Amino acid sequence: MITVERLREIKEKQRPILEARLKEKDIATINEDGSIVLKGEYYERQVRIALKNCGIIDPYNIEDYIAVDGYSALADILMNKSRQEIIDDMKASNLRGRGGAGFPTGRKWEEAFKYDADQKYMICNADEGDPGAFMDRSILENDPHAVLEGMAIGGYAVGASKGFIYVRAEYPLAVKTLRVAIEQARELGILGNNIFGTDFSFDIELRLGSGAFVCGEGTALIESIEGKRGMPRTKVFRTAHKGLWQKPTIINNVETYANVPVIFQKGVDWFRSIGTEKSPGTKVFALVGKVENAGLVEVPMGMPLREIVYDIGGGVQDGKKFKAVQTGGPSGGCIPADLIDTPVDFESLDKIGSIMGSGGMVVMDEETCMVDIARFFLDFTVEESCGKCVPCREGTKRMLEILENIVAGKGEEGDIEKLERLSDTISSASLCGLGQTAANPVVTTIKYFRDEYEAHIKEKKCPAGSCQALVQYFITEKCIGCGACARACPVGCISGDKKERHVIDQDRCIKCGACMEACPPKVSAVVRR
């Protein structure tokens, strides 16, 4: 059985080993509380809470986690705090769910706490499915014990003795790391019966998801754990009342749980000092797309998009012009360049039609077609719809068909209005969050980039020059008549005499771009419009 004294012994033994293993060139400073700050411009503007141990500890060694105060919060809570005090502290911290909706964690825990039941459950939603998102995966692979500790603290608070981590089978390294962490915690007595000699017992099991995006929705995830097809339930009861096997159930995501131990280590006031009044703390983003420094970043809530993209991300690649950033994955919205100073918090993003989501942040440059971006995300949603409700199943398909016609040069007058009407219907009538937010990329691109839609439909042109069906290649007066373009054309649609300007037959052109590649760089007579 683990004791507080044994926990302290492990920390005192392991801490010097941990610090010796880290290279001095990688460490900027070691704070008074023992936390380690890494060097490098990429980290200067970041404040790491959820990612604080990533790259610092060995995820396969529980003693490394204990060396950085791991499980000290759980021990202190079990020895010194009541369940109500834990919930009061969580409410006071105003930690909001990092999985998308931003619902206050303390209020959720309080709801499950107040219901009497012979069994309650804690679930960690690790079914991270947004394209380009890998926030949860990084925490699970590098700091799994933070999630286990957060779940155990929540289990004690609400009176749950069983936890499940629902993780994607496509994350084999995360699955391996979690299995090792759970087994080590059991061997040490941190999971199991009578933890730290108290009457609190708690254990955790893994459940592997098969890659269905809709299982990121809470009730669909619950159905999957129960062995059923992952489809959302009609929301008659909240899961905190009747969730897994109709018992009170708490569902939080990986990043939310990773914040919990730190809040109790450093205090509510410390946590509230970071971020904004309504959105305290930090948020982890997967900063990807046309940005110089792509990767995971953790920043205080309220930091303007401009600082994330330029100060941390290093700006747009190849010196190109910033056009937009998409936040929130397939359920999020596209934010234009003139709103780049928007603070990144729940309320500010909601006002401009986007969401925080789980933390995807895709940077786009001047060569990105916003109509095609909307088509891309909607295509993903159509593929991932479970098909249970008609608005999502049929409505998103009709929207996708319209968008595909527009990017193919077959758009018609009235298509924009049809998209807007369908968006309203799908958003208001769909059963779960997948359908309710599916139209967000379309709605925001129409709102902020309507001129691009109109150019595609009325002029049959793609202003960004990226929609292949609407691209045209022309040979300018710079042509010296060398014939290189004609020889490279696979369909023989280029004609012209030697040393005379050549011409492309637009009706026969397949828009492959071979002519532009073949044209001598010193001439550059072939252009794409």
Image: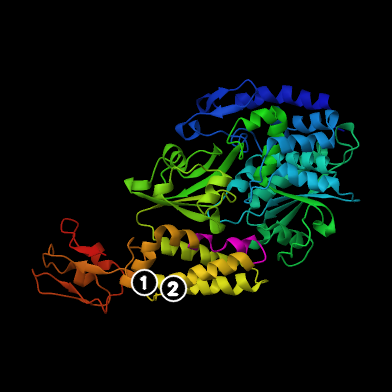
Considering the numbered disc 1 on the image, is that residue within a helix, a strand or a loop?
A: helix
Considering the numbered disc 2 on the image, is that residue within a helix, a strand or a loop?
A: helix
Q: Residue furthest bottom?
A: 507
| Residue 500 seen in render | yes
Q: Main secondary structure of the magenta part?
A: helix
**Amino acid type, mark 2:** Asp
Residue placed at 36% from the left, 67% from the top? 454
| Residue 212 seen in render | no
- Say whether marks 1 and 2 touch (CB < 8 Å): yes
Q: Which residues are magenta?
A: 430-442
Q: Image height check: is 279 above or below 39? A: below
**Hey, which quadrant is residue 80 in on the image?**
top right
**Amino acid type, mark 1:** Ile
Q: CA distance from mark 1 to mark 2?
A: 8 Å
Task: Give the x, y percent position of residue 40.
Answer: 47, 31
Task: Give the x, y percent position of residue 209.
Answer: 69, 59
Residue placed at 68% from the left, 28% from the top? 266
Residue 68 falls left or right of residue 110: left
Residue 459 falls left or right of residue 285: left
Asked if the magenta segment contains residue 439, the reply would be yes
Residue placed at 85% from the left, 46% from the top? 114
Q: Which residue was labeled with disc 2?
A: 415
Q: Which residue was labeled with disc 1?
A: 457
Residue 248 falls left or right of residue 279: right
Q: Nearer the viewer, residue 35 or 269?
A: 269
Q: Image height check: is 49 above or below 359? A: above
Q: Residue furthest top?
A: 32
Task: Give the x, y percent position of residue 379.
Answer: 52, 67
Which mark, by number, is residue 529?
Answer: none
| Of callouts 1 and 2, the N-terminal one | 2
Residue placed at 50% from the left, 71% from the top? 400
Label 2, residues with CA under 10 Å away: few <14, some 14-19, many ≥20: some
